[in-house]
Amino acid sequence: MPLQVERLTGIRREQSATRKNTAILQKDHLGLLKICPIARWTAKDVHYYLQENGLPYHPLREQGYLSIGCHPEEGYCTSKVKPGQDPRSGRWAGFDKTGDILYLLDSRGRDTSALFALNLNTDEKLLLAENPKADVGEVLVHPTEKTIQAVGFTYARREWKILDESIKKDLDYLATVEDGELLVTSRTLDDQQWTCAYLLDNGPVKFYRYDRANQKAHFLFNSRDDLDGYPLVNMHAPIIDARDGKKLVCYLSLPKGSDPDGDGKPDKPVPMVLNVHGGPWARDEWGYDAEHQWLANRGYAVLAVNYRGSTGFGKSFVNAANGEWSRKMHEDLIDAVNWAVKNGVAQQDKVAIMGGSYGGYATLVGLTFTPDVFACGVDIVGPSSLVTLLQNVPPYWAPFMPVMKIRVGDVDTEEGRQALLERSPLTLVDKIKKPLLIGQGANDPRVTQLEADQIVEAMQARNIPVTYVLYPDEGHGFALQQNRMSFNAVAEAFLAEHLGGRFEPVGDDFEASSIHIPRGVTADGRQRRILPPAERQIAEAKSSARKRLRIAHLLPRIFVAMNGSWRYFWFYFTGASASGRR
C-alpha cells in the first residue's frame, strides 16, 4: 500500500485517506521507497526523498526545484525549474522491472511534456515518446516486463504512439470495435486477456474483454444502461484560429436533426450556448458530456473552447494566459463565437455564455466587457472581483498563491490590486444590459458567497434586473442531485426565454431542493425577494384552496401562451422544477 509522509514531522503511515500536508511515496519492485513527487502546484513546497537503503529522508527547501528521483549514493537528485511552470506537468509513471529505471513525464527544457526513462544510478535520461502539440496522457505498460508499449496523447482526440510492435495488431483491431477512444483498463499476467473501455460521445462507456489469442473482443457491459433510447448527439472537434494565430481545440455538439450530413455544421444557424470550462487550468475533452447532451436536446448548439490557459497543450499555451484574465483569454472565446457565426453554426443574436467557476467569471466578463455579443449569461459560482477572490482564498490554497500571482495577479500591492480591479466584472457592472442568471453555493470556500452578493447588489443599485439562485447547503458547485436538477430547470427556462429553445414542463420537484432565490424577476418586470422552500410552504398554506387550484390550472396555459416566459415562471411558481431532465 502506498505510504504518506508528513512534510513537517516526517511521520510515515499507510495511505488511508487524503490528509493535509502529506505526499504519497512510491515503492519499487523490491518494496523500497524510491520517489516522492510532491511538487505539483508550486515549487515552494518542501520535497522529501528516502534513500534506497532506508536512511532518513532529506528535505529540500530551496525554491525553484522539482525533485524527481532518488540517487543511491547522494540520497536524492533534483533539477531546477521555473516556479509555477514545470511542477504541474512533471510526474512519474512507474519503474521498470529492475527498479533502477524511472519512467518520468517531464517538460523541463521543452514545451509539451514527454515520456522519459531516467536511470536512477547514472542520471541518464532517454526520450521515449513525445508529441509537439500535446502533453503525455496514458501510458500502456507490460504487466510483468514493465516496459512501455504505447503512449497516449490527446490533442483533439486521443492518439496512441506504439513503442512495442508486438501489440500493434492488437491496437489496430481494437480500434475497429467501437467508434470511440480506447483505454486498456487491465491485463492478465500472461497478457492473453485484456479488459478495455471505449469512451463514446453519444452514449455510455462500453467495456469489453479482449481475447488476444483469437483477436476477438467480447462485450461485457455499459457504464449507464439508462442512456439507451435517448436521442443523443455526436461531438465534433473543430480547431479554431485565435486572432494571434494560436490554435484553439474546441468541441461542438449540435441539436438532433440539424446536421443531416454529419459534417459538424447545421443546415441553418441555430441558437448557441458557449459553455466555458472552469479551472481555468483544466481542459475540455471529446466524449460523452451531459451538459452538451442536455443543451443540444433543448435545441442549442453547444461550443466548448480550450482557451489559452487550458492544460494538456504544452506549458507555453498555459503560460500565454498569465495576466490575461478578461483579456486574451476572453478574446479566445469571442474568436470562437465569431467563427461559429461566420460558419453558419450560430445565430448571431442568439448566443448565450454559460459556465462554472472560471467559466462563471468568463460569463460575467462576457456581459460586462463585451455586452453586445451575448443574448444572456448563466454564471455558476463565478468570481465577480479578482481582488476579493484573492483576498478570501481558503487556507489550503496557501501553497498555490505564489503561482496565482504569476497566473492572475498580485493582490498584495496597490498596483497589483488596481490591475486586478480593471479585469473584474464588478468594476464594469453598469455595462450589463443582457439578462443574467447567477447560481451560488452559500458554503463555497473558493468563490465565496460575497462574489455573488456584491455583483447582485451593484446591479440592484443600478436597477439592472438579475436572477440570483442561492443554495444554503452547497459549496463550489452543486453536489446534491435535487439541487442540480432544480438549477437545470431554472437555467433551461431562462435560456428558453432568451434564446427560444425548448424546456421541459415543470412540476413540483423543487420542493426536494434547498433552492433559495434572494432576487428574481416578477411578472411586472420588477425585482423582488422570493421565499425559500420552507417559508414559501408556510405562505402557500395560508392561501385559499381556490387560489392554489386556479394557479395550478392556469400554469400550463401560461407556459404555452408565453412560450416559457421567465417572468411568469418566477411570479407564479418559483421553486418548481423539471423532473428527469437529461
Image (cartoon, helix red, strand yellow):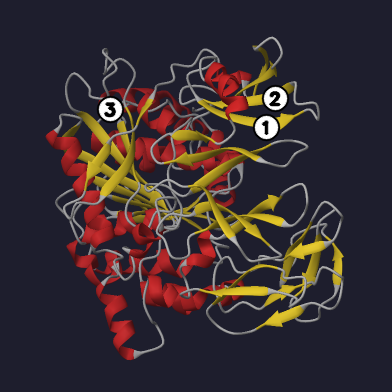
Q: Which residue is mark 2?
A: 195
User: Residue 15: in sight, yes or no?
Assistant: yes
Q: Which of marks 2 and 3 precedes in the sequence? A: 2
Q: Which mark is residue 446?
A: none
| Of 361 and 306, the residue lying toward us | 306
Q: Which mark is residue 185?
A: 1
Q: Check disc 3 and report its element: helix, strand or loop.
A: loop
Residue positioned 54% across, 61% down in the render: 442
**Mark 3 Cα-neighbour bin, 10 Å: few <14, some 14–19, many ≥20:** some
Residue 21 is situated, as x and y percent measured from the top left of the image, at: 71, 73
Amino acid type, mark 1? Thr
Q: Quadrant of residue 43?
A: bottom right
Q: Is residue 73 left or right of residue 305?
A: right
Q: Check disc 2 and report its element: helix, strand or loop.
A: strand
Residue 407 is situated, as x and y percent measured from the top left of the image, at: 39, 70
Q: Is residue 381 left or right of residue 150?
A: left
Q: Which residue is mark 3?
A: 563
